[in-house]
Amino acid sequence: MNASRNPKIRITVNKFEVKATLNDTEMSHDFISLLPLELRMKDLFCREKFANLPRSISKKGTQIQNYEVGDIAYWAPGEDITIFYRQDTQKMEEGLYKLGKVLDDIAPFDTPGSIPVKVELLS
């Protein structure tokens, strides 16, 4: 396990790489235990990309109702990882937990339809 307080990950979208930092929570550390992951992220409401994780992860983290562009979140009811690329100011339902934040340009996620994504822990 990475001893960093805020572990960093690399997300590859097609041929673009973006870096992100994760919160120092039990939930984020449980997410890291799934890495590396190759996912096909689908689009939802032209504001976020999401994909189902291979298993549920801990819900010991920060639950949110409002999100910011670049937030990485876990949608517990669907066992989904979500990356928000556009803001629509809609309040989120219960069950959304913030995992971290994309540090680089979010533009690679703002593309129609589903996208192939690879998520890896940076050492």
Image (cartoon, helix red, strand yellow):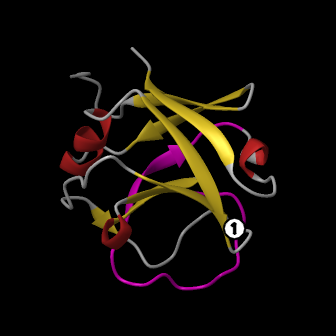
Rendering quarter of residue 108: top right
Q: x and y percent of residue 16 in the render? A: 74, 28
Magenta span contains residue 47: no
Per the image, the residue denoted by label 1 is 47
State the residue at coordinates (52%, 47%). 101
Verify whether residue 86 appears in magenta. yes
Image quarter of the N terminus: top left
Between residue 28 and residue 114, name the one nearer to us. Answer: 114
Say left or right for 34 vs 105: left
Q: Is residue 21 above or below residue 3?
A: below
Q: Magenta region: which residues?
A: 83-104
Q: Amino acid at mark 1?
A: Arg
Q: How many marks?
A: 1
Q: Position of residue 7 (x, y in %)?
A: 36, 30
The location of residue 39, given as percent across then percent down, is: 52, 41
Q: Which residue is at 29% across, 25% downward?
A: 4
Residue placed at 37% from the left, 68% from the top? 78
Instruction: Please say if 90 is above or below 2.
Output: below
- The picture places residue 118, in percent across and down from the top left corner, at 54, 31
Crowd around label 1: few <14 · some 14–19 · many ≥20 (10 Å): some
Helix, strand or loop status at disc 1:
loop
Q: Which image quadrant for residue 34? A: top left
